[in-house]
Image (spheres, helix red, strand yellow):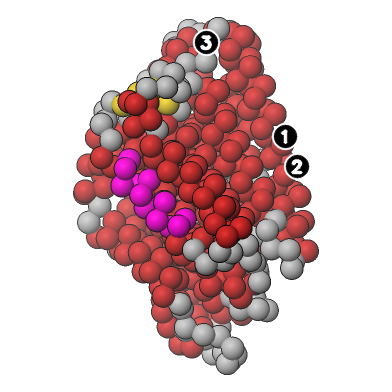
């Protein structure tokens, strides 16, 4: 390994080293600096990624810090930092102690950054499974709740099946083309006229595995149970950065152009079923986290709709929506985490009058619901607009119309939360305290992104256009 290689992988090294450092600090000064070290490492990794040269590539290590990788490394690192800020006081209330939690969050961010920087299928798989392994721990980390252990077990079992599918798919692709280099695999298996049955079987297994990662129907059944049982800040991280990494996985593998049509049919059905099942099932939910789980299934269906176009416009819309969705879900689950006390607030009806008793968290939660529903001038409206615009431009008119109708249906269950926050009286227990400083910073940042992108999206759109060139 050369000095240049070390320089290139420094954003990854910062995250990996910080994860180990947090564990070591726990043996010396337990519980004192772990969150601060984790947040500092995530911010440091993001800053280092910003100043890397655009074409930095390490042949030996199989990573390439392209503008695409730098963009997603910054996104994942900042999301992990926000998760740590949201988690600090929530974990105190839930009696989740120890350095394992912040160390695992930082390690998950490391796995996500590896995914975005991968130059071959082996590194891509290792990065994806590194972050998934971290979430096996995080989902089940609340030892005081049986639901957390149950959620962790379900996620582990189905995650193992997903990993097996992806590994077997990569093996078949390697058998078909004799290389693990992503550009070569894509060129030789998805180019016009390529119909190797072994390669097609490999792509099929890859799609099955990745459908689990991003909760596409019919690989979605784990999602509501895991969202309900896992600690709420973990759900915020799982529903945003984890799915963003899986989308980055797809973007690296699916090129724009006619060769993409090879996978059009399975992706078309995954998108359709996810939009319909996710939105219709969310209508029936009374538990807020389960409702947001089903809504996330529908949101991933919208993303696949844009991917279907195989165009640069569609891919830009996907990246835009990943950023927007990250801010919206961090705000939604972050507000829920801040509002949750020792007994928790599980059902939508539990939020009656909270907009008045806890005005800051209530306002952030309401803003997140408006954004998820796609109501202007929030970022959710901008994100959905570009998704459907790209779909119409890409010729996916019937599916885009179904998506628009499904998005209109979703307004009911999102706005039902706002109605409970402000239009139905409720008694607020005296034990509820205002948001802490760390929670306020994270929630304010997420709310600012929702409003800023909704009002003035041009800088972000220009940045996304530059990383796709």
- Comparing 117 with 423, the one in front is 117
Work out whether 63 lies above or below 140.
above
Q: Is residue 138 left or right of residue 83?
A: right
Q: Which mark is residue 237?
A: none
Q: Secondary structure at mark 3?
A: loop
- Comparing 21 with 63, the one in front is 21
Stretch in magenta: 37-49
Residue at the disc numbered 1: 161
Residue at the disc numbered 2: 157
Q: CA distance from mark 3 to mark 2?
A: 30 Å
| The quadrant where residue 65 appears | top left
Q: Where residue 404 sits in the image (x, y, percent)?
A: 44, 50
Q: Residue at x 59, y 64 (%)?
A: 30
State if disc 2 and disc 3 touch (CB < 8 Å): no
Q: Where residue 234 sits in the image (x, y, percent)?
A: 58, 58
From the viewer's perspective, is the residue at label 1 or at label 3 nearer?
3
Do we see residue 353 in this rendering? Answer: yes
Going from N to C along the chain, the mark reached first, 3 or 2, is 2
Going from N to C along the chain, the mark reached first, 1 or 3, is 1
State if disc 2 and disc 1 touch (CB < 8 Å): yes
Q: Which mark is residue 179?
A: 3
Q: CA distance from mark 1 to mark 2?
A: 7 Å
């Amino acid at each position: 390994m050369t000095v240049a290689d070390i320089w290139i992988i420094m954003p990854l090294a910062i995250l990996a080293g910080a994860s180990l450092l947090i564990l070591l600090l726990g043996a010396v000064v337990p519980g004192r600096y772990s969150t601060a070290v984790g947040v500092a490492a995530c911010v440091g990794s993001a800053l280092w990624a910003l100043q890397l040269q655009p074409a930095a590539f390490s042949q030996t290590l199989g990573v390439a810090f392209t503008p695409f990788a730098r963009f997603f490394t910054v996104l994942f690192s900042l999301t992990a930092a926000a998760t740590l800020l949201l988690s600090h006081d929530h974990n105190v209330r839930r009696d989740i102690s120890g350095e394992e939690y912040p160390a695992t969050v930082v390690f998950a961010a490391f796995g996500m950054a590896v995914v975005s920087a991968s130059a071959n299928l082996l590194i891509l798989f290792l990065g994806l499974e590194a972050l998934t392994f971290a979430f096996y721990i995080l989902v089940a980390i609340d030892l005081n709740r049986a639901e957390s252990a149950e959620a962790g077990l379900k996620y582990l079992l189905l995650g193992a099946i997903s990993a097996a599918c992806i590994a077997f798919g990569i093996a078949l692709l390697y058998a078909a083309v004799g290389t693990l280099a992503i550009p070569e695999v894509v060129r030789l298996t998805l180019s016009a006229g390529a119909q190797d049955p072994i390669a097609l079987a490999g792509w099929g297994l890859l799609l099955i595995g990745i459908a689990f990662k991003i909760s596409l129907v019919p690989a979605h059944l784990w999602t509501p149970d895991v969202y309900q049982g896992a600690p709420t800040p973990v759900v915020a991280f799982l529903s945003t950065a984890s799915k963003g990494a899986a989308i980055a996985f797809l973007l690296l593998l699916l090129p724009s152009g006619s060769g993409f049509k090879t996978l059009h049919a399975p992706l078309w059905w995954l998108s359709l079923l996810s939009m319909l099942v996710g939105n219709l099932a969310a209508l029936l939910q009374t538990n807020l986290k389960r409702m947001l789980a089903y809504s996330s299934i529908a949101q991933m269906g919208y993303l696949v709709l844009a991917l279907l176009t195989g165009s640069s416009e569609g891919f830009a819309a996907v990246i835009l929506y990943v950023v927007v969705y990250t801010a919206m879900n961090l705000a939604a689950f972050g507000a829920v985490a801040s509002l949750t006390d020792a007994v928790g607030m599980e059902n939508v009806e539990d939020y009656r009058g909270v907009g008045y008793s806890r005005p800051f968290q209530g306002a952030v939660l309401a803003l997140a619901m408006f954004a998820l529903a796609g109501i202007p001038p929030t970022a959710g409206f901008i994100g959905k607009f570009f998704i459907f615009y790209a779909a119409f431009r890409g010729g996916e008119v019937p599916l885009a119309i179904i998506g628009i109708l499904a998005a209109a249906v979703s307004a009911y269950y999102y706005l039902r939360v706002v109605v409970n926050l402000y239009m139905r009286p409720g008694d607020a227990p005296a034990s509820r305290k205002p948001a802490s400083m760390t929670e306020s910073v994270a929630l304010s940042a997420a709310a600012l992104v929702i409003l800023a992108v909704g009002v003035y999206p041009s800088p972000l759109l220009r940045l996304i256009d530059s990383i796709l060139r």
